[in-house]
Amino acid sequence: MTINIALYPWQAQQWQRFCEQQKQQRLAHAIIVSGVAGLGKASFANAMVASVLCESAESDSACGKCHSCNLFFSGNHPDHTAIVPEQGSSSIKIEQIRSLKDKQELTPTVANWKTVIINPADKMTISAFNSLLKLLEEPQNNTLIILVTAQSDRLPITIISRCQTVKLSSPEPQLTLEWLEQQQQIDSATLALILPLSNGAPLAALTMLQNGLAEQIQSLNSDFESLLSGDANPIEMTKKWLQYDPLMIFHHLQHLIKHTLCCSQDELTNNNSKRYWYIYDCIISAIKLTSSSNNINKTLLIEQFMVAIMDKSLSSTLAVKS
């Protein structure tokens, strides 16, 4: 197993701060690495651990050559523990944290530090959180525990208060464009389609591009225009939309409507404004249903959404003509 420790341009400031703390021997015993999905949080956490475990102190990153680095990069370092949900489970359980506590009491065997990465930290059960809290309240010397999460709001305040937080933020669109251009061909127009759905995260945007999402969005835009004009066939269009991720569909349409309402307010008639707000409400309802844990009928949901839009579009047209 090869461990990714790539550092990205939008992480430079946070990495420099970490390196300074390490040089000054002021590292916190527990750190939360947070940020939306697609910013490279896991690789950033790996880079932190690799730097701490490295036997060389000549640079701001792991040397990649010493015995400790070789062990870590191969995924076999005895002083490092990676905790993830067990196979077949979506949560991190108390037994995993208890075994961690036992291991943390041991003396390091190769490096001068013992390190832990819990990812995703927000998937710990309540009992696992309570067990981890005891470990954070009585930290061992030369121990670094890193909690990686895209949903830090799900972490108990008792955990957050005992950790230093490193928040990775989405970079400016221009930096994202420049980085993506190095990975594959892309233009600013295509980026504008992808960026809202990726929350501005470059890695998430890259995955979307590689999965052909830009073409899907262009097709959705055309379909949505047909719905607004009342010229669509909901049954046939639903078959097409079922090939896409439902949440992607509704989040993209939400962005379209918000853009229309915010940027074209002066151009919208009162009747059109009401229509767009009605459609926006329909989109929000669809997102809530799609995001719920209930086993919804996606075909019926999409068909009803389309019919609701076409009915509202038709009634708006008749109102204008009258």
Image (spheres, rainbow, N blue to C red):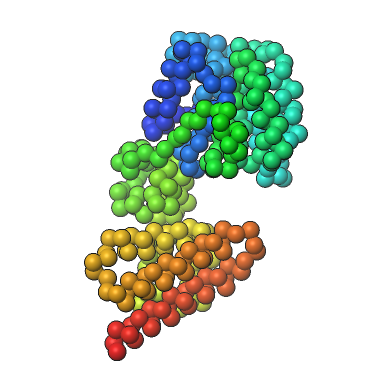
Name the image quarter holding the N terminus.
top right
Q: Which quadrant: the C terminus?
A: bottom left
The structure residue drawn at horizontal position 71% and vertical position 44%, both measured from the top left corner, is 89
Left or right of 52, for residue 254: left
Estimate the x, y position of residue 216 in percent, counting from the top left: 43, 60
Residue at 30% x, 41% y is: 174
How many marks on residues?
0
Res 172 quadrant in image: top left
Horizontal and vertical percent for residue 203? 45, 41
Q: Nearer the viewer, residue 138 or 239?
A: 138
Q: Position of residue 101 (x, y in %)?
A: 72, 24
Decide: is 160 above or below 68: below
Residue 67, quarter of the rendered image: top right
The residue positioned farthest toward the left in the image shown:
266
Kindly identify the residue that appears in the image at 38 percent across and 78 percent down.
Answer: 313
- Residue 185 visible within the image: yes
Residue 85 visible, this orientation: no
Whole-percent x, y for residue 249 in the image: 47, 61
Q: Relative to 37, does residue 166 appear above or below in the rendering?
A: above
Extreme residue toward the bottom, this view: 322
Name which residue lies at 60% across and 59% down. 292
